[in-house]
Image (cartoon, rainbow, N blue to C red):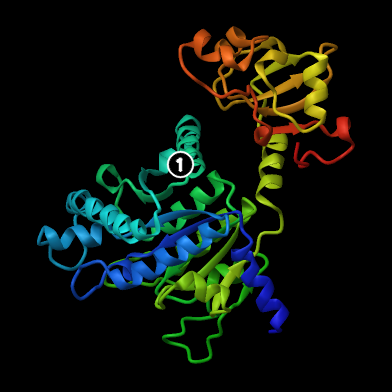
């Protein structure tokens, strides 16, 4: 591998605007004592501070609540019953959040705890609420520390699910890069513990059946999930335009180590997150309604601006917040498609009004835009470009 290839891979992390970092239980919790590995956690916190110091946003997805809680409850090693896992998570989550706060406090970084379930990333309204909360936290300078809400899980809890949760969070937040820190340093052609000829796969351009077949189960004392869940996470992330790196966290300052060309596996995304999102809005969502806008708003859309309520002259159909709608000019020509920040009922009440009037009219402070430009795709014939172009 050439120096240039190494440099290109390192830049995927160093140049990312928004980074999601997943920390596995086996790294954060000392398996011998069941306590937080504080020296290592402090080195990762310094990494996070360094990324933020150069203008990058960081989101952490942290395992470890069950592993921390079971020691305090005196639960024996081995597989736990569901109710025992939930109890351990309830106790351990407090300690996990405190550990992150103590690690990031010296860097002047505010920590926010966010507990998510699968439904929060897949049910549209809950997805929008979670995304809005996380984006607000990032805008306010906080570092969200996310974990699965294990205390209310109704299915068997698997530690490795946080690999997929990290990918879903990256998808939700249109992150540029996701890093899965684990006790393994990447994807191998075979199990390196059994096959001395196994080779590390440094880069994956496409997740093929051969790549899937390389992923075998991995189990540690405090976590499970293995390479199969990491490849599944990579599939989600790459489809969302997000590069994903699987790297060993068994080193101090693991993010620095990745940038310094530590052995790891990169799953490469071939489109930018914003482009992928625009393609999804334009091509895979069925519009639930229509917004008719005036000439001034139409001209603003052509310049890449958001759609404000002042420019809306009519609302057609019934749709909810977050639903896809068509944007038409007054002659009925489609100008764009996008995700409405308001239901059809609320959009009708604020149409033609200034954004500063929204709180008074609706009784709550919503977004200034009916459709934010990040959620808007200008129809191709208006610009002569593909539907995936950024508006």
Residue 62 in the image: state x and y as whole percent: 37, 57
Q: For residue 349, which quarter of the picture?
A: top right
Determine the residue located farthest toward the bottom in the rendered image: 196
The residue sitting at 65% across, 10% down in the picture is 351
Q: Is residue 21 left or right of residue 87?
A: right
Label 1 residue SS: helix
| Residue at 21%, 48% in the rendered image | 90
Q: Nearer the viewer, residue 132 or 78?
A: 132
Query: Could one spot residue 215 in this view of the protein?
Result: no
Rendering coords of residue 222 (x, y %): 27, 68
Left or right: residue 351 compared with residue 386: left
Asked whether, in this view, residue 41 is left or right of residue 259, the answer is left
The C terminus appears in which quarter of the rendering?
A: top right
> Quick check: 99 above or below 255?
above
Measured from the top left, where is residue 18 in percent x and y?
57, 53
Give above or below for 132 relative to 243. above
Q: How many marks?
A: 1
Q: Quadrant of the N terminus?
A: bottom right
Crowd class of label 1 (few under 14; some 14 to 19; many from 20; radius 10 Å): some
**Residue occupying image coordinates x 78% and y 41%:** 389
Residue with the mark numbered 1: 137
Q: Is residue 182 above or below residue 169?
A: below
The residue lying at 58 percent from left, 15 percent from top is 356
- In percent of width and height, residue 107 lies at 40, 59
- Res. 146 in view: yes
């Amino acid at each position: 591998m050439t120096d240039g290839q190494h440099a290109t891979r390192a830049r995927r992390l160093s140049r990312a605007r928004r980074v999601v970092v997943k920390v596995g239980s086996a790294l954060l919790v000392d398996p011998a004592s069941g306590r937080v590995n504080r020296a290592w956690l402090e080195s990762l916190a310094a990494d996070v501070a360094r990324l933020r110091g150069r203008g990058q946003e960081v989101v952490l997805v942290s395992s470890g609540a069950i592993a921390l809680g079971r020691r305090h409850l005196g639960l024996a090693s081995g597989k736990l019953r569901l109710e025992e896992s939930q109890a351990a998570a309830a106790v351990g989550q407090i300690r996990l959040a405190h550990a992150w706060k103590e690690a990031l406090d010296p860097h002047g970084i505010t920590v926010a705890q966010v507990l998510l379930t699968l439904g929060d990333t897949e049910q549209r309204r809950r997805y929008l609420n979670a995304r809005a909360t996380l984006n607000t936290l990032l805008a306010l300078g906080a570092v969200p520390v996310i974990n699965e809400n294990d205390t209310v899980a109704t299915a068997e809890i698997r530690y490795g699910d946080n690999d997929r949760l990290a990918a879903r969070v990256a998808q939700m937040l249109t992150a540029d890069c996701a890093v899965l820190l684990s006790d393994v340093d990447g994807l191998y052609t075979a199990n390196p513990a059994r096959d001395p000829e196994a080779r590390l796969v440094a880069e994956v351009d496409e997740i093929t059946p051969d790549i899937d077949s390389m992923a075998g189960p991995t189990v540690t004392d405090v976590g499970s999930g293995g390479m199969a869940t990491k490849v599944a996470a990579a599939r989600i992330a790459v489809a969302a335009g997000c590069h994903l790196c699987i790297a060993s966290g068994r080193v101090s300052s693991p993010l620095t180590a990745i940038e310094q060309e530590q052995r790891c596996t990169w799953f490469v995304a071939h489109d930018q997150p914003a482009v992928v999102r625009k393609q999804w809005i334009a091509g895979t969502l069925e519009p639930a309604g229509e917004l008719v806008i005036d000439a001034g708003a139409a001209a603003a859309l052509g310049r890449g601006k958001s759609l404000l309520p002042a420019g809306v002259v009519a609302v057609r159909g019934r749709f909810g917040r977050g639903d896809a709608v068509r944007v038409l000019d007054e002659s009925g020509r489609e100008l764009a498609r996008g995700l409405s920040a308001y239901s059809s009922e609320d959009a009708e009440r604020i149409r033609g009004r200034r954004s500063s009037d929204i709180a008074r009219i609706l009784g709550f402070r919503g977004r200034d835009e009916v459709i934010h430009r990040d959620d808007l795709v200008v129809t191709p014939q208006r610009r002569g470009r593909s539907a995936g172009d950024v508006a």
